[in-house]
Amino acid sequence: MAAPTFEVPKLKEFSEVPAVQPDVMAHIKSFPASAPIQEAIGFPGQLVDNWEQKAIEKMGDLLGKYRSFKVYLDACVHCGACTDKCHYFLGTGDPKNMPVARQDLIRNVYRRHFTFAGKYFPKLVGAKDLTRDVLDQWYNYYHQCSECRRCSVFCPYGIDTAEITMAGREILDSIGVGQKYTNEILGKVQRIGNNLGLPGPALEDTLAGLEEDIEAETGAPVRLPLNQKGAEILLVTPSADFFSEPHVESLIGYAKVFHAAGISWTLSSHASEAGNFGLFIGNYETMRNIALRIREAALELGVKRIIVGECGHAWRVAYSFWNTLVGIGAGADDPFAIQLQQQLDPRYPAPQHICEFTYDLLKRGALTIDKSANDHRVITFHDSCNVARGSRMGDMPGGQFVIPREIIKMVANHYHDMGDDTIHESTFCCGGGGGLLTDDLMEVRVKGALPRMEALNRVVNDHQVNFMAMICAICKAQFTKVMPYYGFNMSMVGGVHQLVSTAIQLGPKQ
Amino acid sequence: MPVLTIVYALLFYAATAMLVIGVGYKIYDYARTPAPLKIPTTPAPTTRSGVVWRMAREVVLFESLFKATKWTWLFGWLFHAALLLVLIRHLRYFQEPVWTIVALAQPFGLYAAFGMVIGLGGLWARRFLVDRVRYISTPSDHLMLALLLAIALSGLSMKYVSHTDIVSLKAFILGLMTFNWQPLPQDPLLMLHLFLVATLMTIFPISKLLHAPGLFFSPSRNQADNPREHRYISAWAAKLDQK
């Protein structure tokens, strides 16, 4: 870890709302996408000549296509309920990181061009023309939002800043101003099949290596099949699971669970990515194109079930959007979606989260577990934002909070929750979600992690917690990188299926 | 017919038209704009009736605001509940005979006017005292509170300081409703009160007062969480399936 060029916030025993410090994060500028990156995914390579006019046209287009955008721009009364809810504001004190002020960057321009009051009385309602300065602020502050939706929990009208940020980024992309990190990945996943740009043969090698490792460690011939036609289950998991630590430990966990359950499964090289960064830039077509690869893989391989690995935003897209985007789900009455839905086994939800799958097996006693194998760990669970506030597990609201915790308690003996206002629907984002997981935003990421770090610090002090479990590839990557800034060891970070992997006993059932 | 009566009669027709047509258009506009994706803020109800219940809690209790900040909730809820009672109390000017429920609400409506003033005062104080709220406040945010407070105070003055001729007032309003104009009592306080109310009605569809219809159209609150069970798709998105 290089010495930071910024001041790392101090952890306090009781979290405080900082005083407003205007423009302290105004210097942040995520690396912009180059022309080839932009053009590869269908956006202009650089700022177009008549960008002001084009941006307003795009805004009008989005206002006609998204009720959320239109209603949310109108409904805000500046009550201030959201002002102390964003982790980026809590970590930085920059008032433009308050959700309402972040929205106002666009709302002011909306008022100027699309409302009576803003057209004729701009000063009165704070309406502003779209100047270069405003455009730069959009780029800056819409890349200091992880689209985590925490503000939407507390807004009396449910205004979701994620929707505004997505619209902001979509307008920016449409006039040639994209972010390098996200848009480069969007090119890779559409060209190759995963965000890492890992081609099929390399994936095959990796999986074979993992099979050897598992067999050497456990003696069990656990397989990680790729492109196996006729398998019962297609597993779609974030590509970080193939390479990164601690992600790969969870992948091993899934493989062990499938092995112990005796169900045939496969990965797909065509759809070797659960993540869908199309969500982050708010572009429906891009999001749909990426999801189409999973539909195509499922049809090609003839699978009966589709299960998604540990990844927060991926699960939101899968659970909430796949049925809409590409007909992965149930209850369709149109030919496009019915084609796949007739192939899928109606006894199981489609898609299904790996935690739902494992929880079901654990409840039925189908897995042999040695809880004491996790006795060296005192565990807490970090609810990932997109799972907590944008999706569900199981058959009841809030199942996304219950099921992962139940799994942990069924495979380990020592568990403690973090503070009530920092978990479940009030969970704090890791600070790296929504397309911010890039080194050029390290200051934003470190400061944005502050609320979670303070909550973690309290359970570390009170209960000697030494392991924070989670079900999101971005959270895992973010925390392993930023926790050392706060004096925590990165080995504290891991997946829920890493814990399952430790405790599960392979071989004949006892 | 006194000129002022004619002016106020026309003013109220215009304000009513603006309120009804303006808000009606906004509702139509919200309703016709598609919501292409399922984005309820979860945990969310999985059924339609569950959504109605969630929405009812938001509308009646301001549930999310309660989770967010107790002070804003207290003043905001007090103001809105008091405003409702005051509006019910005022129905007596629009009815002959007066409904029993409206008659019964009269004393409560009277106290509620003080509730309005306290609520508005608290909400306004936050705009000065809390640095975050001060930062986001625009001139129109202050003016809106000033307008509502002036309506409440001018109304209270007619009850406690200088009584107005409410019998003639009622005749004026009933006359407006039946297009059989009656003279408006020439009382400056009443004129002020009515002018401010007409102003409020006029700006409703072009201001942040749209939060009232907006809440019902908020996808994060009005959608059921059942995307795996039912395919949900908007017209423009469905066209992509045909390619």
Image (tube, coloured by chain):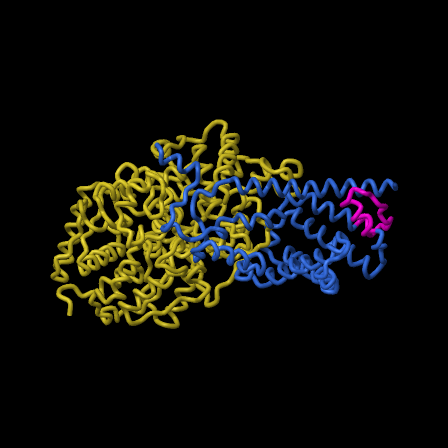
Chain colours: A yellow, B blue
Foreground: B38 or B238? B238
Residue B179 is a magenta residue: yes
Apparent side of residue A334 relative to residue A29 in the rendered image (left or right): left
Query: What's the magenta region?
Result: B169-192
Residue A171, x across and y down, in percent: 47, 37
Q: Is residue A145 visible?
A: yes
Res A8 visible: no
Q: Position of residue B230 (x, y in %)?
A: 38, 48
Q: Nearer the viewer, residue B135 or B229?
A: B229
**What number of labels is visible?**
0
Where is residue B56 drawn, in percent x and y?
Answer: 55, 57
Residue at the extreme top: A49
- Asked whether A302 or A259 is in front, the reply is A302
Above or below residue A484? Residue A376 is below
B67 in the magenta segment: no
Q: Quadrant of the C terminus of chain A?
A: bottom left
Q: Quadrant of residue A469?
A: bottom left
Residue at x 29% of width, y 62% of height: A359
Assign the N terminus of chain A to one quadrant of the image: bottom left
The relative height of residue A40 versus residue A5 in the rendered view (above or below) is above
Residue A26 position, x and y percent, is 50, 45
Observer-nearest residue: A360 or A173? A360
Q: Is residue A248 left or right of residue B41?
A: left
Name which residue lies at 22% across and 43% down.
A269
Residue in the picture at 39% in, 69% down: A459
Seen at 27% across and 56% down, the residue is A246
